[in-house]
Amino acid sequence: DWTPSNVVHDQVAAIRAQVGDARVICALSGGVDSAVAAALVQQAVGDQLTCVHVDHGLMRAGEVEQIERDFVSATGVNLVIRDEKERFLTALAGVSDPETKRKIIGREFIRVFEDAQRDIVAEAGEHGAEVKFLVQGTLYPDVVESGGGEGAANIKSHHNVGGLPDDLEFELVEPLRTLFKDEVRAVGRELGVPEEIVARQPFPGPGLGIRIVGEVTAERLEILRKADAIAREELTRAGLDGEIWQCPVVLLADVRSVGVQGDGRTYGHPIVLRPVSSEDAMTADWTRLPYDVLSIISTRITNEVDDVNRVVLDVTSKPPGTIEWE
Ligand code: XMP
């Protein structure tokens, strides 16, 4: 029988069998998947686990602080935050191709974990040499869409599955590999992970890096972060979070259009709102948001975010569109 408590029971046993006495590090992104994966591993092997959050500079406003505060206070896990913003910006400089961006982000992400491992080993002395496991919150749809499932087409290389470097030094622990999102949430609740984390909408591992169409730069990230924060704030204020699976906010950095603001002509970038309704992200429909909410979001973004003079709505289902633009 599929029940959350059976999944916890089975996975805890499987993790213990896989890991033994070794130390484990967990890729904690701040999303529900990695949080539930970490909580499972914590349940299985306790303080053998160290969580590491890579601050790749591609997170949304306030998210790193939220991981530090909410997740740590809920679970009590050891958390190391690595500030790698410069490293990712440098690696992404000049790159516009979506798949190349995904591969670069995935590669750097894993390398940072290898650095984290070295530091943890150095701190732990002799016993640290046994750090050889990396936890990832890979879900069943990620496996299928990356070509890992039977008969699956390779649509996008999800950075927690595809694009891993050949010289990977870790063995992966992926306790959510057979689960869909709603099942992960049920398992999270079973484990006592707080509701604000369990109910969180999905956010891709490569973060805002794949929501800027064009090259990723610090200035563009700042623009997108402001627009995204406004959209999220207004959707929450309107009570629409439960209705929406997720709402990517995308910056078309390579597109400009003419506008007028105050006394003058502007030549700014469009922001795309991509609200979708879905059961499992394999298929999705665009969410029919109330016009007055769209209007508030549009007015605020064009007024408050420099260099943005137009807000457009994506009314494409999946298929044919994917949820993310890249
Ligand atoms: P697409 O764009 O393929 O997205 O329709 C399906 C779901 O997956 C999320 N997504 C990712 N999640 N790593 C992740 O952990 C990734 O590389 C990644 N790419 C997309 C996306 O936000 C949506 O929920």
Image (cartoon, rainbow, N blue to C red):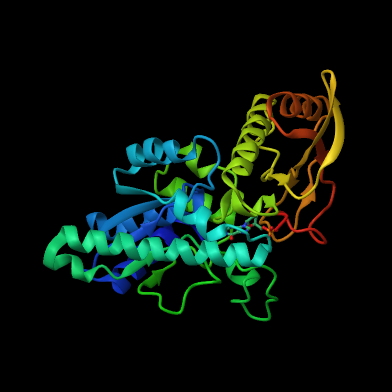
Q: Which quadrant of the view contains residue 271?
A: top right
State the residue in front, 23 or 300: 300
Of residue 20 and residue 321, the one placed in the foreground of this image is: 321
**Picture quarter with the C terminus:** bottom right
Camera-side residue of 131 and 244:
131
Q: Residue furthest front?
A: 264
| Residue drawn where x is 52% and y is 53% of the image | 89
Left or right placement of residue 148 versus residue 281 in this view: left
Residue 317 lies, in percent from the top left, at: 82, 54
Quarter holding ligand 1: bottom right
Res 204 quadrant in image: bottom right
Residue 127 vertical position relative to residue 148 in the rendered view, above or below? above
Q: Residue at x 66, y 45 (%)?
A: 246
Q: Is residue 264 left or right of residue 91?
A: right
Q: Residue at the left extreme?
A: 126
**Image position of 157 with respect to 54: above or below:** below
- Residue 304 spot, x, y in % from top left: 69, 25
Residue 251 placement (x, y as % from top left):
71, 44
Residue 1 is at least partly visible in this image: no
* Relative side of 4 to 292, left or right: left
Q: How many marks?
A: 0
Name the residue at 54% across, 65% down. Answer: 104
Residue 154 seen in the current view: yes
Q: Residue at x 47, y 74 (%)?
A: 165
